Protein backbone atom coordinates (compact mmCIF):
# COMPACT_ATOMS: atom_id res chain seq x y z
CA UNK A 1 0.00 0.00 0.00
CA UNK A 2 1.27 3.42 -0.94
CA UNK A 3 0.49 6.82 0.57
CA UNK A 4 -0.41 10.22 -0.83
CA UNK A 5 2.11 12.79 0.38
CA UNK A 6 2.09 16.58 0.16
CA UNK A 7 5.46 18.32 0.56
CA UNK A 8 4.79 21.86 1.75
CA UNK A 9 7.59 24.37 1.27
CA UNK A 10 8.83 22.29 -1.64
CA UNK A 11 10.95 25.03 -3.22
CA UNK A 12 13.12 25.63 -0.12
CA UNK A 13 16.36 23.87 0.83
CA UNK A 14 14.63 21.40 3.15
CA UNK A 15 11.66 20.83 0.86
CA UNK A 16 13.91 19.94 -2.05
CA UNK A 17 15.86 17.56 0.16
CA UNK A 18 12.63 15.90 1.32
CA UNK A 19 11.63 15.33 -2.31
CA UNK A 20 15.04 13.83 -3.02
CA UNK A 21 14.74 11.42 -0.09
CA UNK A 22 11.17 10.44 -0.95
CA UNK A 23 12.29 9.60 -4.49
CA UNK A 24 14.66 7.00 -3.04
CA UNK A 25 11.63 4.88 -2.23
CA UNK A 26 12.04 3.88 1.42
CA UNK A 27 8.60 5.28 2.24
CA UNK A 28 5.87 3.63 0.14
CA UNK A 29 4.14 6.41 -1.80
CA UNK A 30 1.58 6.38 -4.60
CA UNK A 31 1.57 10.13 -5.13
CA UNK A 32 3.77 13.07 -4.15
CA UNK A 33 2.76 16.68 -4.74
CA UNK A 34 4.87 19.81 -4.34
CA UNK A 35 3.18 22.71 -2.54
CA UNK A 36 4.51 26.21 -1.84
CA UNK A 37 3.51 29.86 -1.65
CA UNK A 38 1.63 31.61 -4.46
CA UNK A 39 4.86 33.14 -5.79
CA UNK A 40 6.13 29.64 -6.63
CA UNK A 41 3.01 28.28 -8.31
CA UNK A 42 3.84 26.68 -11.66
CA UNK A 43 7.55 26.35 -10.97
CA UNK A 44 9.10 22.93 -11.36
CA UNK A 45 11.06 21.02 -8.70
CA UNK A 46 13.03 17.82 -9.14
CA UNK A 47 11.70 14.53 -7.86
CA UNK A 48 14.42 11.96 -8.30
CA UNK A 49 16.85 11.95 -11.20
CA UNK A 50 14.34 12.28 -14.01
CA UNK A 51 10.93 13.40 -12.72
CA UNK A 52 9.77 16.95 -12.07
CA UNK A 53 6.75 18.19 -10.16
CA UNK A 54 4.84 21.40 -10.84
CA UNK A 55 4.36 23.44 -7.69
CA UNK A 56 0.80 23.94 -6.47
CA UNK A 57 -0.32 26.87 -4.30
CA UNK A 58 -0.70 26.37 -0.56
CA UNK A 59 -3.40 28.96 0.08
CA UNK A 60 -6.16 26.98 -1.63
CA UNK A 61 -4.62 23.50 -1.56
CA UNK A 62 -7.10 20.78 -0.55
CA UNK A 63 -5.45 18.29 1.84
CA UNK A 64 -8.46 15.95 1.81
CA UNK A 65 -7.41 12.47 0.75
CA UNK A 66 -3.72 13.05 1.53
CA UNK A 67 -2.23 10.76 4.16
CA UNK A 68 0.87 12.74 5.08
CA UNK A 69 1.93 16.37 4.89
CA UNK A 70 5.66 17.06 5.25
CA UNK A 71 5.80 20.76 6.13
CA UNK A 72 8.78 23.09 5.98
CA UNK A 73 7.38 26.47 4.93
CA UNK A 74 8.27 28.68 7.91
CA UNK A 75 6.69 28.87 11.35
CA UNK A 76 3.98 31.43 10.66
CA UNK A 77 2.83 29.57 7.56
CA UNK A 78 2.71 26.25 9.41
CA UNK A 79 0.72 27.90 12.19
CA UNK A 80 -2.00 28.75 9.67
CA UNK A 81 -2.01 25.74 7.36
CA UNK A 82 -0.84 22.74 9.39
CA UNK A 83 -4.01 22.66 11.55
CA UNK A 84 -6.08 23.02 8.39
CA UNK A 85 -4.36 20.00 6.87
CA UNK A 86 -4.68 18.03 10.10
CA UNK A 87 -8.41 18.70 10.30
CA UNK A 88 -8.73 17.39 6.74
CA UNK A 89 -7.29 14.06 7.88
CA UNK A 90 -3.74 14.62 6.65
CA UNK A 91 -1.15 13.80 9.33
CA UNK A 92 1.30 16.69 9.44
CA UNK A 93 5.01 16.30 10.16
CA UNK A 94 6.13 19.86 10.70
CA UNK A 95 9.76 20.97 10.45
CA UNK A 96 9.22 24.46 11.87
CA UNK A 97 9.39 25.57 15.49
CA UNK A 98 5.66 26.30 15.62
CA UNK A 99 4.38 23.20 17.44
CA UNK A 100 7.48 21.76 19.11
CA UNK A 101 6.66 22.71 22.67
CA UNK A 102 2.91 22.02 22.38
CA UNK A 103 2.08 19.37 25.00
CA UNK A 104 -0.33 17.71 22.56
CA UNK A 105 2.25 17.44 19.76
CA UNK A 106 4.97 14.74 19.87
CA UNK A 107 8.50 16.01 19.24
CA UNK A 108 10.27 13.10 17.60
CA UNK A 109 13.70 11.78 16.76
CA UNK A 110 12.99 8.16 15.83
CA UNK A 111 16.29 6.79 17.18
CA UNK A 112 15.61 8.46 20.53
CA UNK A 113 11.90 8.60 21.42
CA UNK A 114 9.95 6.69 18.78
CA UNK A 115 7.43 5.56 21.42
CA UNK A 116 6.25 9.17 21.81
CA UNK A 117 4.64 8.90 18.37
CA UNK A 118 1.69 7.25 20.12
CA UNK A 119 0.30 10.72 20.85
CA UNK A 120 0.22 11.84 17.22
CA UNK A 121 -3.59 11.73 16.95
CA UNK A 122 -4.19 14.33 19.66
CA UNK A 123 -3.76 17.02 17.01
CA UNK A 124 -2.76 14.98 13.95
CA UNK A 125 0.50 16.94 14.03
CA UNK A 126 4.03 15.69 14.76
CA UNK A 127 6.91 18.13 15.26
CA UNK A 128 10.40 17.70 13.85
CA UNK A 129 13.01 19.14 16.27
CA UNK A 130 15.58 21.81 15.62
CA UNK A 131 18.52 20.60 13.51
CA UNK A 132 21.12 21.20 16.23
CA UNK A 133 18.98 19.40 18.80
CA UNK A 134 18.48 16.35 16.57
CA UNK A 135 22.14 15.53 16.13
CA UNK A 136 22.90 16.14 19.80
CA UNK A 137 20.19 13.89 21.23
CA UNK A 138 21.04 11.08 18.79
CA UNK A 139 24.57 11.12 20.22
CA UNK A 140 23.42 11.51 23.84
CA UNK A 141 20.79 8.75 23.87
CA UNK A 142 23.09 5.67 23.92
CA UNK A 143 25.19 7.26 26.67
CA UNK A 144 22.15 8.27 28.73
CA UNK A 145 20.99 4.64 28.58
CA UNK A 146 24.21 3.58 30.35
CA UNK A 147 24.57 6.40 32.86
CA UNK A 148 21.96 9.11 33.47
CA UNK A 149 23.05 12.49 32.13
CA UNK A 150 22.95 15.29 34.66
CA UNK A 151 24.18 18.26 32.62
CA UNK A 152 25.17 19.14 29.06
CA UNK A 153 27.20 22.16 27.95
CA UNK A 154 27.24 22.54 24.17
CA UNK A 155 28.77 25.02 21.73
CA UNK A 156 27.50 24.73 18.17
CA UNK A 157 29.18 25.64 14.90
CA UNK A 158 26.24 25.96 12.54
CA UNK A 159 26.39 26.29 8.77
CA UNK A 160 24.65 29.06 6.87
CA UNK A 161 22.27 26.65 5.10
CA UNK A 162 20.32 26.54 8.36
CA UNK A 163 19.24 30.10 7.55
CA UNK A 164 18.10 29.31 4.00
CA UNK A 165 19.21 29.85 0.42
CA UNK A 166 19.67 33.60 0.79
CA UNK A 167 22.13 32.97 3.61
CA UNK A 168 24.13 30.59 1.42
CA UNK A 169 24.16 33.19 -1.35
CA UNK A 170 25.32 35.84 1.11
CA UNK A 171 28.28 33.73 2.23
CA UNK A 172 29.24 33.01 -1.38
CA UNK A 173 28.98 36.63 -2.53
CA UNK A 174 30.77 38.07 0.51
CA UNK A 175 33.60 35.56 0.14
CA UNK A 176 34.02 36.44 -3.53
CA UNK A 177 34.12 40.16 -2.74
CA UNK A 178 36.92 39.70 -0.24
CA UNK A 179 39.28 38.50 -2.97
CA UNK A 180 38.72 41.76 -4.84
CA UNK A 181 39.30 43.82 -1.69
CA UNK A 182 35.63 44.76 -1.57
CA UNK A 183 32.95 44.43 1.08
CA UNK A 184 29.33 43.36 0.83
CA UNK A 185 26.95 44.63 3.47
CA UNK A 186 25.14 41.82 5.32
CA UNK A 187 21.40 41.50 4.81
CA UNK A 188 20.64 38.02 6.18
CA UNK A 189 23.01 38.05 9.15
CA UNK A 190 23.76 40.70 11.75
CA UNK A 191 27.45 40.78 10.76
CA UNK A 192 29.52 39.72 7.77
CA UNK A 193 29.66 35.94 7.72
CA UNK A 194 32.57 35.46 5.31
CA UNK A 195 35.77 34.73 7.28
CA UNK A 196 33.87 35.38 10.50
CA UNK A 197 31.84 33.65 13.20
CA UNK A 198 28.65 35.12 14.67
CA UNK A 199 27.40 34.16 18.17
CA UNK A 200 23.84 35.05 17.24
CA UNK A 201 21.26 32.65 15.78
CA UNK A 202 17.61 33.71 15.89
CA UNK A 203 16.45 36.49 18.22
CA UNK A 204 17.81 37.35 21.65
CA UNK A 205 15.73 36.47 24.70
CA UNK A 206 15.32 38.55 27.91
CA UNK A 207 17.94 36.44 29.72
CA UNK A 208 20.58 37.10 27.05
CA UNK A 209 20.32 33.73 25.34
CA UNK A 210 19.14 33.40 21.75
CA UNK A 211 16.02 31.57 20.66
CA UNK A 212 18.20 28.91 19.01
CA UNK A 213 19.91 28.25 22.35
CA UNK A 214 16.56 28.11 24.12
CA UNK A 215 15.32 25.57 21.56
CA UNK A 216 18.22 23.26 22.36
CA UNK A 217 17.50 23.48 26.08
CA UNK A 218 13.76 22.91 25.88
CA UNK A 219 13.71 20.37 23.07
CA UNK A 220 16.43 18.18 24.58
CA UNK A 221 14.47 17.96 27.81
CA UNK A 222 11.21 17.15 26.01
CA UNK A 223 12.78 14.49 23.79
CA UNK A 224 15.32 12.83 26.06
CA UNK A 225 14.77 13.59 29.75
CA UNK A 226 13.16 16.53 31.53
CA UNK A 227 15.74 16.36 34.34
CA UNK A 228 18.76 17.10 32.12
CA UNK A 229 20.27 20.57 32.50
CA UNK A 230 21.43 22.10 29.22
CA UNK A 231 23.58 25.17 28.58
CA UNK A 232 24.01 26.10 24.91
CA UNK A 233 25.94 28.68 22.92
CA UNK A 234 24.97 28.67 19.23
CA UNK A 235 27.32 30.15 16.66
CA UNK A 236 26.99 30.67 12.90
CA UNK A 237 30.15 29.83 10.96
CA UNK A 238 31.17 30.34 7.29
CA UNK A 239 30.35 26.77 6.21
CA UNK A 240 27.71 26.04 3.58
CA UNK A 241 26.30 22.71 4.86
CA UNK A 242 26.86 20.72 8.05
CA UNK A 243 26.56 21.59 11.72
CA UNK A 244 29.23 20.71 14.29
CA UNK A 245 28.93 20.65 18.08
CA UNK A 246 31.42 20.47 20.94
CA UNK A 247 29.51 18.71 23.73
CA UNK A 248 30.55 18.37 27.35
CA UNK A 249 28.52 15.85 29.35
CA UNK A 250 28.33 15.33 33.11
CA UNK A 251 26.81 12.04 34.28
CA UNK A 252 25.27 10.88 37.55
CA UNK A 253 27.16 7.57 37.43
CA UNK A 254 30.48 6.24 36.12
CA UNK A 255 30.91 5.61 32.40
CA UNK A 256 34.21 4.47 30.93
CA UNK A 257 35.61 5.48 27.57
CA UNK A 258 35.31 1.87 26.43
CA UNK A 259 31.63 1.72 27.42
CA UNK A 260 30.94 5.05 25.73
CA UNK A 261 32.68 4.11 22.49
CA UNK A 262 30.96 0.73 22.34
CA UNK A 263 27.54 2.27 22.97
CA UNK A 264 28.09 4.89 20.29
CA UNK A 265 29.44 2.37 17.81
CA UNK A 266 26.36 0.16 18.25
CA UNK A 267 23.77 2.96 18.29
CA UNK A 268 21.36 3.28 15.39
CA UNK A 269 22.02 6.47 13.45
CA UNK A 270 25.47 7.09 14.95
CA UNK A 271 28.74 6.76 13.05
CA UNK A 272 31.82 6.68 15.29
CA UNK A 273 34.91 8.17 13.63
CA UNK A 274 37.43 8.44 16.44
CA UNK A 275 41.10 7.61 15.85
CA UNK A 276 43.08 10.70 16.85
CA UNK A 277 46.44 8.98 16.39
CA UNK A 278 45.67 8.76 12.68
CA UNK A 279 43.87 12.13 12.50
CA UNK A 280 40.52 10.42 11.95
CA UNK A 281 37.60 12.61 12.97
CA UNK A 282 34.55 14.02 11.20
CA UNK A 283 34.18 17.54 9.84
CA UNK A 284 31.16 19.16 8.16
CA UNK A 285 32.53 18.77 4.64
CA UNK A 286 32.97 15.03 5.23
CA UNK A 287 29.31 14.40 6.02
CA UNK A 288 27.45 16.41 3.37
CA UNK A 289 24.77 14.18 1.87
CA UNK A 290 25.10 11.58 4.62
CA UNK A 291 22.24 10.59 6.92
CA UNK A 292 24.16 9.70 10.07
CA UNK A 293 25.27 11.59 13.14
CA UNK A 294 29.06 11.43 13.26
CA UNK A 295 30.79 11.34 16.64
CA UNK A 296 34.51 11.96 17.11
CA UNK A 297 37.04 12.92 19.80
CA UNK A 298 35.40 10.95 22.59
CA UNK A 299 37.44 11.69 25.70
CA UNK A 300 37.16 12.03 29.43
CA UNK A 301 36.61 15.33 31.19
CA UNK A 302 38.83 15.19 34.26
CA UNK A 303 37.34 18.35 35.78
CA UNK A 304 34.19 16.57 36.96
CA UNK A 305 33.64 13.21 38.64
CA UNK A 306 31.90 11.59 35.69
CA UNK A 307 32.41 13.53 32.48
CA UNK A 308 32.94 13.09 28.74
CA UNK A 309 33.59 15.36 25.78
CA UNK A 310 32.31 14.69 22.26
CA UNK A 311 32.64 16.28 18.83
CA UNK A 312 29.42 15.72 16.85
CA UNK A 313 28.84 16.54 13.16
CA UNK A 314 25.85 16.03 10.86
CA UNK A 315 24.34 17.30 7.62
CA UNK A 316 21.77 19.79 8.93
CA UNK A 317 19.64 19.71 5.78
CA UNK A 318 19.49 15.92 5.69
CA UNK A 319 19.43 14.33 9.16
CA UNK A 320 18.87 17.71 10.78
CA UNK A 321 15.65 18.31 8.86
CA UNK A 322 14.50 16.40 5.77
CA UNK A 323 15.64 12.86 6.60
CA UNK A 324 14.37 13.02 10.17
CA UNK A 325 10.95 14.11 8.83
CA UNK A 326 10.83 11.17 6.43
CA UNK A 327 12.05 8.79 9.15
CA UNK A 328 9.19 9.99 11.35
CA UNK A 329 6.80 9.21 8.50
CA UNK A 330 8.33 5.75 8.08
CA UNK A 331 8.02 5.02 11.80
CA UNK A 332 4.44 6.28 11.82
CA UNK A 333 3.54 4.03 8.90
CA UNK A 334 5.20 1.00 10.45
CA UNK A 335 3.83 1.45 13.97
CA UNK A 336 0.41 3.08 13.58
CA UNK A 337 -0.86 3.21 10.00
Image: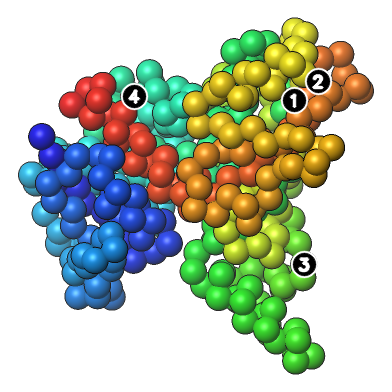
Q: Is residue 153 visible?
A: no
What residue did someone put label 1 on? 249
Badge 3 element: loop
Q: Are marks 1 and 4 in contact (CB under 8 Å)?
A: no
| Mark closer to the chain start, 2 or 4 | 4
Image position, residue 131 (x, y; %): 53, 45
Residues tagged 3 and 1 counted as in contact (Cβ below 8 A)? no
Which residue is at a point 69% across and 22% down the rendered structure image? 261
Q: Quadrant of residue 1?
A: top left
Q: Residues within 10 Å of mark 3 (few under 14, many from 20)?
A: few
Residue underneath mark 3: 196
Q: Earlier in the sequence, mark 1 or mark 2?
A: 1
Q: How is the image coloured?
A: rainbow
Which residue is situated farthest in the front direction here? Answer: 278
Q: Marks 1/4: CA distance? A: 27 Å
In primary-sequence order, the first of circles 1 and 4 is: 4
As rendered, which of 59 and 136 lies closer to the eye? 136
* CB atoms of marks 1 and 2 within 8 Å: yes
SS for callout 1: strand
Residue 216 left/right relative to 82:
right
- Frontmost residue, 195 versus 49: 49
Image disc number at residue 304: none
Nearest to N terminus: mark 3 or mark 1: 3
Q: Which residue is mark 2?
A: 307
Q: Position of residue 87 (x, y in %)?
A: 16, 40
Q: Residues within 10 Å of mark 1 (few under 14, many from 20)?
A: many
Inter-mark Cα distance, 1 to 2: 6 Å
Alpha-carbon distance for marks 3 and 4?
40 Å
Whole-percent x and y of residue 204? 66, 52
Which mark, residue 117?
A: 4
Q: Distance between the Cα atoms at labels 3 and 2?
A: 31 Å
Amino acid sequence: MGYRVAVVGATGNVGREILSILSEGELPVDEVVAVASSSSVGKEVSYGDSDVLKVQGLDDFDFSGFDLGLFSPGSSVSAEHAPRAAEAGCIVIDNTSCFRMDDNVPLIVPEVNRDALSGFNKRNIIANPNCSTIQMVVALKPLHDIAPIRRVVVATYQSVSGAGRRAMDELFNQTRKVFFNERLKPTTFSREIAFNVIPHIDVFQPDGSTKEELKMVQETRKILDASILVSATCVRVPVFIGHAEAINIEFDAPISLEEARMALENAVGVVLVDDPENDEYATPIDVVGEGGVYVSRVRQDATVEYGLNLWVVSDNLRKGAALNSVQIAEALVQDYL
